[in-house]
Image (cartoon, rainbow, N blue to C red):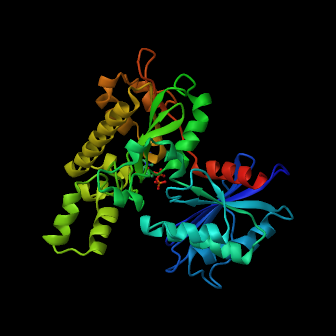
């Protein structure tokens, strides 16, 4: 490691895992994760060259929560950094609610406020916040920054944010927020160099990973997105259903006798590609499978992505560019090809050779709407935000 600019840590905490990375300037020098927390915790870590790094010994006192894992990691990091100090920690926080349209320096009062948003994102928000609180209490001098997945979508017009339900519910915060904002913000930040011809135009970015959504941007600002009140809405995903007639939920509760926890489990963990195919939630498995249900799941996914692109093009008043990103968008050429073919009516003309080579531009010179493959990097976005907030 060089003796370059300030080092910042990036934390992405879930219910039983803690992903972390250390950034120096714009480069990642250490990345790893602790998973199986509460059951059988294991740690994997790699340095900038991809060499495995042995982390702290978890066996002696296995962490019982991601917050405990972070507290074990901090003293180990101090030694690993050999005298260099961590300038701050940036955290991915799923929900910034109606108020936060940019990252915020973490404090106990901010955490109290963000905890009131937990009912809006019960599967993520409490897990994102707990390690921040633990580190604030144990290491109060270490600056921490909360970076919100919703913040980028604050530029969506009010008509896009609204659900057609009684106004009193909207005043309680029931509206479209949109997610994957750190990924979209990163893409918006690199568009001027990666695809300058479309950076100021009307672009649909397809974040297609295990979680999937689309964002319509005008000049790099969010105008509309497929995810809504929660990260369950919009496109079908690995195990999440995506957009669903709300009457289906009522039917499951009333006619099928399911309780809310069972419905939640089904819609979040047993639907999407896994539910449709019965084979796997992973697109690699689906693409390799000869099971007709795997093919069908892919067809449903492509259909919904293409419909979503059309819908966002309507919200944008036209389409100047299409960008594919995240695990599926960056790697699955057959999925990109099928989506582009379904978007031919919008002026997207695929170049199959460029697509097979993963671009970066996957449409021919004559295509009215260019399509690009651009790798996303949410952690780098969080590191940039963290550096900027603590420098203030
Ligand atoms: P997450 O939402 O977990 O961050 P990623 O963006 O890493 O997800 O995407 C993970 C998904 O990307 C995997 O579930 C897999 O389906 C898909 N994927 C990764 N590599 C490939 C590949 N070479 N071909 C097809 N799909 C891929």
Q: Position of residue 70 (x, y in %)?
A: 65, 72
Report the side of 101 relative to 251 (left or right).
Answer: right
Q: Position of residue 350 (x, y in %)?
A: 38, 25
Q: Nearer the viewer, residue 104 or 343?
A: 104
Q: Quadrant of residue 225?
A: top left
Q: Quadrant of residue 263?
A: bottom left
Q: Nearer the viewer, residue 27 or 241?
A: 241
At horizontal 53% and vertical 58% (from top left) the residue drawn is: 96
Q: Residue furthest front?
A: 168
Report the side of 56 relative to 375 (left or right).
Answer: right
Q: Nearer the viewer, residue 162 or 223?
A: 162
Q: Quadrant of residue 87?
A: bottom right
Report the side of 320 relative to 132 (left or right).
Answer: left
- How many labels, in total? 0
Work out whether residue 17 can be spotted.
no
Q: Position of residue 335 (x, y in %)?
A: 35, 39
Work out whether residue 349 can be spotted.
yes
Q: Position of residue 376 (x, y in %)?
A: 55, 43
At horizontal 21% and vertical 51% (from top left) the residue drawn is: 293
Q: Residue furthest bottom?
A: 61
Q: Nearer the viewer, residue 111 or 290?
A: 111
Report the side of 392 relative to 331 (left or right).
Answer: right
- Reply above or below: 312 against 29: above
- Reply above or below: 370 against 304: above
At horizontal 34% and vertical 31% (from top left) the residue drawn is: 314
């Amino acid at each position: 490691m060089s003796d370059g600019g300030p080092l910042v840590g990036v934390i992405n905490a879930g219910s039983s895992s803690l992903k972390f990375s250390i950034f120096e300037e714009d480069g990642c020098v250490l990345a790893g994760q602790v998973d199986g927390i509460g059951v059988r915790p294991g740690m994997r870590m790699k340095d900038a060259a991809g060499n495995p790094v042995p982390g702290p010994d978890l066996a002696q006192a296995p962490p019982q929560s991601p917050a405990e894992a972070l507290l074990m990691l901090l003293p180990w990091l101090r030694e690993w950094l050999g005298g260099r100090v961590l300038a701050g920690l940036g955290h991915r926080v799923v929900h910034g609610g109606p108020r936060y349209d940019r990252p915020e320096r973490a404090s106990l009062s901010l955490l109290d406020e963000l905890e009131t948003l937990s009912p809006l994102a019960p599967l993520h928000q409490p897990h994102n916040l707990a390690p921040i609180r633990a580190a604030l209490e144990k290491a109060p001098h270490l600056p921490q920054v909360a970076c919100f997945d919703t913040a980028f979508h604050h530029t969506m017009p009010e008509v896009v944010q609204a659900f057609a339900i009684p106004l009193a519910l909207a005043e309680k915060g029931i509206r479209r927020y949109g997610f994957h904002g750190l990924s979209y913000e990163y893409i918006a930040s690199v568009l001027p160099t990666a695809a300058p011809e479309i950076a100021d135009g009307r672009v649909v970015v397809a974040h297609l990973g295990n979680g999937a959504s689309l964002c319509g941007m005008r000049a790099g600002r969010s105008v509309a997105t497929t995810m809504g009140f929660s990260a369950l809405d919009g496109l079908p995903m690995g195990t999440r259903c995506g957009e669903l007639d709300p009457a289906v939920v009522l039917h499951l509760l009333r006619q099928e006798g399911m309780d809310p926890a069972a419905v939640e489990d089904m819609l979040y963990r047993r639907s999407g590609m896994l539910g449709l195919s019965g084979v796997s939630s992973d697109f690699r498995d689906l693409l390799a499978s000869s099971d007709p249900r795997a093919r069908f799941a892919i067809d449903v996914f492509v259909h919904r992505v293409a419909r979503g692109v059309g819908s966002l093009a309507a919200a944008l008043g036209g389409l100047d560019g299409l960008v594919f990103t995240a695990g599926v968008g960056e790697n699955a050429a057959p999925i990109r090809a099928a989506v582009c073919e379904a978007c031919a009516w919008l002026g997207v003309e695929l170049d199959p050779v460029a697509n097979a080579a993963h671009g970066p531009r996957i449409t021919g010179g004559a295509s009215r709407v260019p399509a690009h493959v651009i790798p996303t990097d949410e952690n780098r976005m969080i590191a940039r935000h963290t550096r900027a907030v603590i420098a203030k």
